[in-house]
Amino acid sequence: EGEVYKYYAEGEWRKSSSGKSVPIINPTTRKPEYKVQACTQEEVNKVMEGAKEAQKAWARTPLWKRAELLHRAAAILKDNKGPIAECLVKEIAKPAKDAVTEVVRSGDLVSYTAEEGVRILGEGKFLVSDSFPGNERSKYCLTSKIPLGVVLAIPPFNYPVNLAVSKIGPALIAGNALVLKPPTQGAVAALHMVHCFHLAGFPKGLIGCITGKGSEIGDFLTMHPGVNCISFTGGDTGIAISKKAGMIPLQMELGGKDACIILEDADLDLVAANIVKGGFSYSGQRCTAVKVVLVMESVADAVVDKVKAKVEKLTVGPPEEDCDVTPVVTESSANFIEGLVMDAKEKGATFCQEYRREGNLIWPLLLDHVRPDMRIAWEEPFGPVLPVIRISSVEEGIHHCNASNFGLQGCVFTRDINKAIMISDAMETGTVQINSAPARGPDHFPFQGLKESGIGSQGITNSINMMTKIKSTVINLP
Ligand code: G3P
């Protein structure tokens, strides 16, 4: 009791000199569960200096040795899935089983990253000059991928472990140092995860983990001259970060309004199963959750009925009991969701279930007959409430999808593969899933958003490439 989790700097666990801490509120009990250090700007400076120093030697550490350490960290992470998952349950109310899955998936991601890194960083290019007009074969160009320096990783609350290692793994295998700023909700799970990397034996200073209030150290971190790359996943803070950041590569994933377009010939049972899983798993708190259903009028009643029947079967309650729908992360998030629901109610949406909320727990809600003048048609609730818009043509569905400020993923349900591909081509999103709900994984698939959903592409291979730069050496023959 009263323990404040330490932050990680120069290979050791430290207390902040601020003497202050940040409480982490359990979304279920709404009482403080843990505390983490409120780090100061001087402490950020120290971590940055340590990272910069350690990175020099790390870049010269053989690739196979870097991979070996990552494999070791992955194994330790998986061995400790129990206690880490417990933090996820208490900090972000992730259902117990999903919490364990997140940690295991993270271990697998780190191992895969080590393997992928060994392959793609083990190869360079060799070019000759006489392919370009006017040149003799007098220049040989050798290129390879070298690290950027210090990568700043800022993951979101919904995957504090998985979306941290999806940045840490690629950064480290490519020879970078890594500074992590975990989300407040999920910080303790992230600190436990960092401890697994500590136990694996990475060099002192190479990995740092700073905790504290975004309002106090956020800008200081993201605008720090020691940072050579930022990989961020989260909300529209990312837009502010990209405006303020220096001339460094940015990888940003900032949410979405993933549309689910349903044609008349779709397999409606498959549709219903995917809407429920895609819309309500982890209470809709996923960037890739189904966030608007666009269904052809002729099958809309049938789809709504099937979804309603499945929603009735969802269990609602605490994450410890592995309920399907659990409390959303904060009270302010619950209030925001409620605001969208009330706006839709005033404007005449049909509620397929009664709206019910206790504390941060919001019961799953399907809103039928949603129209474009309702906020929920466009805004991202990040909660278990899902709007259905009835459309009279496929074009109308595509138009709604493309009128969004977001462009992360989308999905289309039809048995006609030609139509599916044409619709996929027309949808302005980073990915379109045919006959399945949107999802980021498997974690080696490219993952990217258009428009306000982000910049750059993630996925293991793309992240490794993004966290390197090309170095050429040209041999000039006499
Ligand atoms: O919300 C974060 C986003 O990356 C979702 O990932 O695995 O739930 O599709 P996933």
Image (cartoon, grey):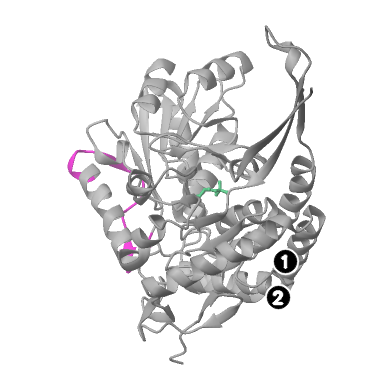
Q: Are marks 2 and 1 in contact (CB under 8 Å)?
A: yes
Horizontal side of residue 215 vs 84, given as left or right:
left
Residue 320, position as x, y percentages in the image: 54, 73
Q: Is residue 114 magenta?
A: no
Nearer to us in this view, 399 or 65: 65
Within-10-Å neighbours for mark 2: few <14, some 14–19, many 20+: few
Span highlighted in magenta in the image: 345-362
For the C terminus, the image quarter is: top right
Residue at (77, 61) in percent of width and height: 71
Nearer to us in this view, 41 or 165: 41
Return the mark for residue 349. Answer: none
* Tag 1 residue: 73
* Tag 2 residue: 199
Three-letter amino acid code at disc 1?
Answer: Ala
Horizontal side of residue 204 vs 212, given as left or right:
right
The kind of secondary structure element at disc 1 is: helix
